[in-house]
Image (spheres, rainbow, N blue to C red):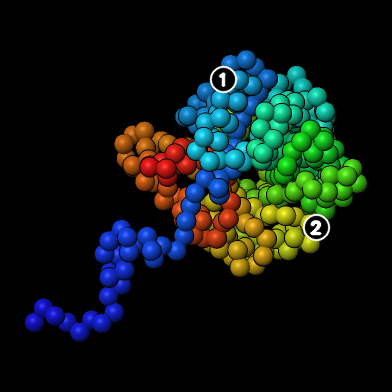
Amino acid sequence: MTHVAQRARPRRNRKSEVIRSACRETTCGPQHFIYPLFIHGGGDDVPIASMPGCSRLSPAGLFAEVERARAVGVNMIALFPAVAESLKDPTGRESHNPDGLVPRTIAALKDRWSDLVLVTDIALDPYSSDGHDGIVAADGRILNDETIAVLCKQAVAQARAGADIVAPSDMMDGRIGAIRDALDGEGFTEVSILAYTAKYASAMYGPFRDALDSAPRHGDKKTYQMDPANAREALREVELDEAEGADMVMIKPAGAYLDIIARVRDATALPVAAYQVSGEYAMLKAASERGWIDERRAVLESLLAIRRAGADVILTYYATQAASWLQG
Ligand code: PBG
């Protein structure tokens, strides 16, 4: 007898694409994506070797890339500046120069597209001669509260230029509340804070540091970024950032931290973001270029998985490419 007693057959809900799409639990589209872009002061687009398809963009290159992104429905971008070595110093003063690369770029983009949502990075590493997110003391320690004072100036300079969302990626303790107060004190009550809440000390940031030439000159970031072994600690960070006034919380990296995304999703009512970082992009690219995986399917699956884990918003270097694949 071939006909076994088998009343429950989950396969019935998979029998055609129409039924599968009716039963699909998770969606993923361009409205969820934030597109990180690298900018520099030069007149050419300079390709980043460890991130094929990404470049340090000139102003013209940036405008062309934003045009492409908007054409497929991606309306949020995150800016990361590659800063000339001559502008770097131990306290990252260029980070709050009102005429610096980021404020100038924000103003130019807003002038062209007032509805484009601009997310800006708050941290000192692109501006620091030490390549750290905070100020380094003589004995090598990263100074928490002294750093926060500079981050507040950076946030205010970016808000004044027209940033919609400031995103502190530095992992100093207490910076969300201090930045909120600094913004409110200057009248920028409508500027949001996307907190890098659970940012791990990951091996996956290497290509990004190539892109910005921002690797630490000595030491590592383990005294401020989180230990990859820890999950409960992420919940502690969420509680603090939420109490300090964060509008959204982020988990970073994404792919290897889906458990953290899921736990944070359950722990807060705030929107949750996840950052598919440069190393995740590089791995997908490298395997695709060798023909070892199907790039389109692998990328869309990775993004869907991040959404399924509980992320509302995804920062991904594949934003524009994925959005155009999703259009069919
Ligand atoms: C630094 C910063 C990093 C990234 C975003 N902001 C690197 C780091 O912490 O060293 C990494 C993003 C990526 O790898 O794509 N403030």
Residue 213 lies in what quarter of the image?
A: top right
Task: Please tell me in which quadrant of the rendered image residue 106 appears.
Answer: top right
> Against 189, is 51 above or below?
above
- Where disc 2 sits, the SS reads helix
* Viewer-side residue, 223 vs 251: 251
Q: Residue at x 36, y 46 (%)?
A: 297
Q: Secondary structure at mark 1?
A: loop
Q: Position of residue 309 (x, y in %)?
A: 51, 60
Residue 68 visible (yes or no): yes
Q: Residue furthest right?
A: 185
List the residue tagged with mark 1.
Answer: 45
Give whichever of 190, 121 is nearer the camera: 190
Q: Which residue is mark 2?
A: 244
Q: Is residue 227 left or right of residue 55?
A: right
Label 1, ligand 1: CB separation under 8 Å: no
- Above/below status of 126 relative to 314: above
